[in-house]
Image (cartoon, rainbow, N blue to C red):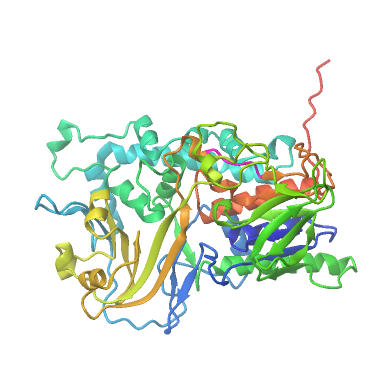
Amino acid sequence: MAIIGSGVGGSFTAKYLADYDSSCTLDITIFDASGLEGEQGSRVSSLTLENGATIELGASIIFGGNKLVQEMIDGDSKLKRTTPHSPGSNREIKTDQTARKGMGIFDDISDGGNPWALLVANMSSNEVKKTLMFRYNLDLWRINRATQSALSSFNMIYDLLDSRHESTFFDSPNDIWRATGLAYAASVSFNDLLDKIGVANLIPWWRHIFGHQGLVRSELYTAINLCNNNQSNDQISGLAGLVNSAATTGDLFAIDGGNDQLIASAIQQAQEKHDGVCRRKDTYNERKIRSIQKKIKTVVSDFESGMELFDSKGKSLGSYDVVVLAVPLQFSGITFLGKGSLFDSNVLHPLSLNGMVDSEDSDANVHEHKGAYGRHLPTSASRPYTQVVTSIIFGDLNATHFYLDEDNIPKSIYFTEKGKKQQMGLSSISQIFGNVYKVFSSEVLSEESVAILFGDTAKVEYTKIWDKGATPAFNGGKESTYSTQFLLYDGGHGSGSLSDDSASLYYVNSMEAAVSAIEISAIGSKFVSKLIARRLGLINSTVEIVEDEL
């Protein structure tokens, strides 16, 4: 078996397959292209500074309700939780200024008034809650209620993952959202969802009486979505918006030393699990779960006997009965071909993948990965991902530029759509510690921009360009959030039959059609692993038998 991609999706898939393989039958090779020239690598990435401090460059925070991530942490004594944006709980970090508190949302400077939609620097958590409730009134309550309802529905997923009932072996994420009652949220924009739950577009007259009122959708939640996904409420899906909202309601943490440690730990736990089983069965000869740094360029299926993988130089890397794609199709750079035709068994042609959409109106027609018979994958498997630039800057924030006094500078600055346009495409500025800041932006910051924001002596320590994208462009829901099937190819039979010896291709990143996060990747990994385990006979599905009453 081959797994293409060694991020959260690929590494967690290896761990779950090892959990299912109680008979020591699997032989898994993980192909890792991270670190190779021109490859983006995992979107969970960190930077270690000279003083030992660790800074997250990609996915920075983990929600306390993320059960699969927590289970992986529990399985490795070396993994420790710490507070988000912490430089490291076990390190002595020298700072030259006091760590700030609170946050602010920068809005509009064009009218000459107060540019801050919200500023809660140096406030206690209770004071912040009271300020938010006063400014946003019932609308904040409406979103919190919708978020809690979505969390309850989302938590059903974990029971579905553990169940062996036939109905819980889902073909696609769309089926998961329908089973959990989240289908509507997954198929519309966040703005559409806010309309449905009654969140105001305009401040009603009676709220003006109180003063200092604001629109939660255009201020707080626009700022959250721009920071997390670099997309506005019109662009992001309703489900992605609710997932971002959940991060404001509960326990948040990060992995001490970098969230990317989850990846190495998952592979190690998979190896230890599998090696232990093999030793007990006296079948241990060599490590059967291994990671190889190679870029897969071409996958060729000969239908019955397997799928052959080739690197960028055309060298064969072996033939596999099951291949798991754990990177987005959009920028995998992989050509999928099938071998054989009615006239010549050696002829190669584009591989027809499952989960096709036949609509001629879809803009997916202009992208690659079309099927062999004129059909094409859903837009979610061909649309671009949003570019994000992470900059680590040493300097002192220019308070005057943001119309602030030195004593009311918040720890984190976020932006509304107007604020982002007026401030060089910035999505957020966060003080990590001392004079070290992390900045999210749409483009690389120029030297002039850095000087304006942090002074003439500021230094850009590191720049990470997520040029292939950090999160999917959700395009406001609808067709864009229709997912591919988990099983993309099953030897050309189109049946997905169980215990089938023909070649098969599974797609973990199908899970990202409507929402993207570390836990979402883990969930996709476990659902795909469950399907593969059933196909290979490692587990069996059950069907409840209801006896007729006498």
In reply to whether residue 485 is colored magenta, the answer given is yes
The answer to whether residue 429 is above or below residue 462 is above
Q: Is residue 530 visible?
A: no
- Please name whichever residue, 342 or 233, is drawn nearer the observer in this view of the structure: 342
Q: What is the span of residues highlighted in magenta in the rendered image?
A: 482-486
Say left or right for 411 vs 113. right
In reply to whether residue 105 is colored magenta, the answer given is no
Q: Quadrant of the C terminus?
A: top right
Say left or right for 30 vs 330. right
Where does the image place residue 63, in percent across and percent down from the top left? 48, 55
- Please name whichever residue, 356 or 216, is drawn nearer the observer in this view of the structure: 356
Q: Quadrant of the N terminus?
A: bottom right
The answer to which image quadrant residue 422 occupies is bottom left
Extreme-front residue of the structure: 343
The answer to which image quadrant residue 483 occupies is top right
Residue at x 23%, y 61% (from the top left corner): 121
Where does the image place residue 2, in percent across and percent down from the top left? 73, 59
